[in-house]
Amino acid sequence: MSTEPMSTEPMSTEAMSTPVHRPGGTARIESLYRYPIKGLSPERLNRVPLAVGKAMEGDRVYALAWRDGLYNAENFEPLSKRQYMVLLNTERIAGLQSSLDLPTRVITVSVQGNPVLTADLNTAEGRAALEQLYARVCDLAPDAAPVLAEQDGYNFTDNANNGTQLMNSISLINLASITEFEQRIGRPVDPLRFRANVYIEGLEPWVERDWVGQTITLGDVALRVLEESGRCAATEVDPVTARRDIPVPRLLHTHYGHDIMGVYAEVISDGTITDGDTLLVGTVDPRLAGGSR
């Protein structure tokens, strides 16, 4: 990523977009998350550097593959999420909280705030310790423990099967859409059920569905919205209690006729996004487009 500072010259009127807002405030980033191991707990971040055409650093760089499944590290091919230990098929993993120190690759796993494992994923011993912990949690025999999957340059996102562009996309959620959904079904819905990277507040419900094909800006980073995010049974699991308690996809279909919640976007300019950054939708400063900074 280039370290040259962006020009401080004012943007022309034609090159600027108007902040999206609803009565009461401007749309902005409410929170940022990454998920270092597919299916496991989120990590809250205050600021995130982004690079053109790349996923969020450290997001879904590992996965726990079923030992008797199709994952083959030597002859790797993108696989369905069902080939991995995820909330779709193994809700009890939500009962553990994991935190990965990305530079050292040391992971700490806790249960109700109490550490139960610290392991160095650079070592065979550390990887095996993590695999055996999740085997015990899921009542698997030691020889059936999942395999910690890692592939250079690969992110184990749900849409990785659909090509590199979508594999490297960033997922965004409009919190107002979740609030409106809560009102429809008459019960609270934890936004982390949707496992997004960027949560945005200050919008009208469902306006994000109009963004596909458009360019948006978060802070000084431009992104192009690629497609909407259809939801699976993983969203049925409460990320706090680890219980499968709300049939989210069915309720979305019942109330809206679709299973959409959120969008995917590709990064088209280098920069850093931070909690509180403003969201713009529409024309982007050409100095931001294409990563030339």
Image (cartoon, rainbow, N blue to C red):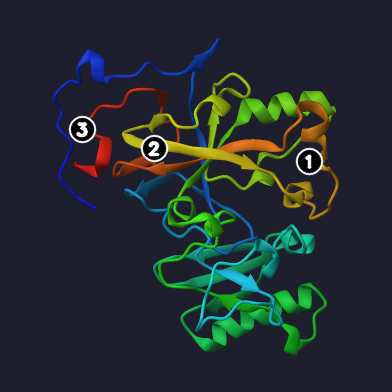
Q: Is residue 179 visible?
A: yes
Vertical arrangement, residue 147 with respect to residue 199, above or below: below
Q: What number is the disc on residue 287?
A: 3
Type of residue at label 2?
Answer: Leu
Q: Nearer the viewer, residue 211 or 293?
A: 211
Type of residue at label 1?
Answer: Val
Q: Residues within 10 Å of mark 1 (few under 14, many from 20)?
A: many
Mark-to-mark CA distance, 3 and 2: 13 Å
**Secondary structure beneath label 1:** helix
| 287 relative position to 25: left or right | left
Image quadrant where one finds the C terminus: top left
Mark-to-mark CA distance, 2 and 1: 28 Å
Mark-to-mark CA distance, 3 and 1: 41 Å
**Secondary structure beneath label 2:** strand
| 169 relative position to 285: left or right | right
Q: Residues within 10 Å of mark 2 (few under 14, many from 20)?
A: many
Q: Position of residue 214 (x, y in %)?
A: 42, 29
Residue where numbered disc 1 is placed: 248
